[in-house]
Amino acid sequence: MSLTTGKETTEVGHPHHHRRRLGVPAVTFMIIAASAPLTVLAGGVTTTFGVTGVTGVPLSFLLLGGTLAVFAVGYAAMSRYVVNAGAFYSYVAQGISRPVGVGVSMVALMAYNLMQVGIYGLFGFTVSSLINERFGITVPWWIPVLVCIAVVAFLGVNRVDLSAKVLGVLVGLEFLVVIVYDVVSFAVAPEGVSGAPLSTQSLFVPGVGAVLSFGIAAFMGFESAAIYGEESKDPKHTVARATYTAVAIIALFYAVSSWAMAVGTGPSAVVDASAKQGPDLMFGFLSDHAGVLLADLARLLFVTSLFAALVSFHNAAARYFFSLGREQVLPRKLGAVRRHSGAPYAGSIAQTVIAVVVTVAFAIAGTGSSLGDLYPVLTMFTWLTNDGAMGLVLLMTVVSLAVIGFFRKNRHDAGIWTRLIAPALGFVLLAAIFVLIVVNFNVLLGQNETNALTLVLPATIIVPGLVGIAWAFRLRRSNPAVYRRIGHGEEGPAAVHLGDEDDV
């Protein structure tokens, strides 16, 4: 089926195989771009040091990386048998039940949109500040955001490998700058190269829950490899290899770089310095010890790091819209793809519209705010990204159970570690992290006590999931054919067993 809109022809239904353009490096870059390495180091790590007062942040990245590696065992194994742009949605639909799968899809849509749109708040503040600092021109934060939305939208409706190439260059430059920062930090080391930040005594102190809650957000996006399964050259192997590669790189890179930050500033001084300077801790250090030119380059790459994350999360949200539209869980038109590129055209537009609407709403609400220039960071960025990270951790926790359910129905060639032990252990560890996020949500939002916002934000994750479950049961009664296809994507009706009524 095709839809003609002016000069643009799109198709609805199964994507063509000419969409399979991505190899392991491309998918890995997509994943790492979503985690935004420079943004995490300059913004996330300094925030964690400053807010929690815990110096064991480097060790936390290794522990979180190990947790996600355990989760990835079953997740990657399942990707060999379930290839669907809906990823979490299709995994849960086939591993637990169709209603829970649809509920998960609504949570995923909310989580990816929250992450993507929230990052626009930090992007707008950063670009506006740079323009004012360099040229003395005051530009409202929402203007750079709207321009960026247009650029991201352009990439979103074109060939996915174009996005991968852009992200590959940006991520490569980020890594180079951070590596220089790490080397200089270890060379300067005012208190010597201390291993204390990597010790358990530095991490397992009051505040460790908040550290892990902040830290898990740095990995968000690593799970998105499966979303590109239908666009991968070899989906049965690409997803697994890219996931393992990304987890290893992210965990080691963040652990070493946060250790370098503690060493370069001094373990005894890094908490106070982070609280007072924020991202400028890194940029000021580079300016003092590596030259103003490199510091300016790092500030510019901080912006491109945010841009890379925006593109990556946009692609993820667009593919969820596409998957749900193709299976008619959402309006069928959302399953439209561009004929020449295979990009999820309608899903990309839907995500763009959401970004514009939310940005405009925050811009209007922030008029005359007492928070001043920091308004988009303390509200739009902080609220939405932490809420989105909570949603993604919840999704991974449920997917761990889905892996067990999937391989219980058909073991394929999976051993007991892959099909049961690793997913069960992953479930326990991720559930613990989810509880820590809930308990420390006030800290993540920068609040001293619980208020209405503390309850409303999690509700934007939970309520859509419950609505999705209810919608699936309605489809079961009103449209059994659509209901049976839920979660089976490109496999089509032939792959659906009528006896597979798991779903009560």
Image (cartoon, grey):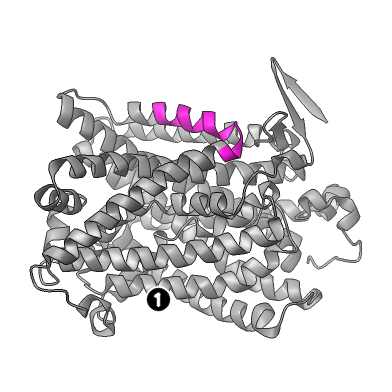
Query: At x 75% / y 36%, what residue is drawn?
Result: 332
Q: Which quarter of the figure is the C terminus placed in?
A: bottom right
Nearer the observer, 166 or 478: 166
Asked whether, in this view, residue 68 is left or right of residue 369, the answer is: right
x then y, percent, for residue 98: 75, 60
x then y, percent, for residue 147: 40, 26
Nearer the observer, 6 or 431: 6
Evaluate whether residue 24 shows in this view.
Answer: yes
Q: Mark 1 highlights which residue?
A: 63
Evaluate whether residue 15 shows in this view.
Answer: no
The amino acid type of the residue labelled 1 equals: Leu
Chain part drawn in magenta: 147-161
Query: At x 9% / y 72%, what residue is drawn?
Result: 191
Asked whether, in this view, residue 130 is left or right of residue 352, the answer is: left
Query: At x 60% / y 41%, what residue is drawn?
Result: 318
157 inside magenta stretch? yes
Per the image, label 1 sits on a secondary structure element best described as helix
Q: Which quarter of the figure is the N terminus placed in?
A: top right
Asked whether, in this view, residue 259 is left or right of residue 413, the answer is: left
